[in-house]
Amino acid sequence: MTKKVVFITGANKGIGYEVARQLAANEFIVLLGARNPQRGEVAANKLRAEGEVHFVPIDVTDDRSPLRLRWSPNNGKKSMYSLTMRGSAH
């Protein structure tokens, strides 16, 4: 079976974290994107109990940051989905 890959930004807490948890538990490979490297690694480490999760740092001050994603799927994993989670500022 080919695993699907999903890249989720803002997945270190809140709704993004829960979506990442559920997808990891359902055989997705989760690329967890977060601005804060420490929080991102902590979240990814916790989520690894559910499935395959990899932390991807996101630099919001660099417009090219998402383009530098250097994670390449292998072992027959060919497709990637992207989900952006962000809070609203009031």
Image (cartoon, helix red, strand yellow):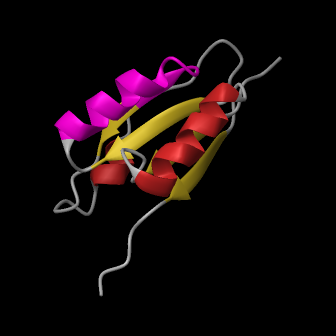
Compare residues 60 and 44 and report the one nearer the observer. 44
Q: Is residue 71 visible?
A: no
Left or right of residue 61: residue 1? right
Q: Quadrant of residue 54?
A: top left
Q: Quadrant of residue 21?
A: top right
What span is in magenta? 37-54
Q: Position of residue 1 (x, y in %)?
A: 83, 17
| Residue at 38% from the left image edge and 49% from the top image edge | 13
| Residue at 39% from the left image edge and 53% from the top image edge | 10
Q: Is residue 41 magenta?
A: yes
Q: Position of residue 22 (x, y in %)?
A: 64, 37
Q: Is residue 20 magenta?
A: no
Q: Residue 34, relative to residue 74: is it above or below?
A: below
Quarter placement of the C terminus: bottom left
| Residue at 71% from the left image edge and 17% from the top image edge | 76
Q: Is residue 55 visible?
A: yes
Q: Residue 19, relative to residue 44: is it above or below?
A: below
The main secondary structure of the magenta stretch is helix
Q: Residue 62, relative to residue 6: is it above or below?
A: below
The residue furthest top is 75
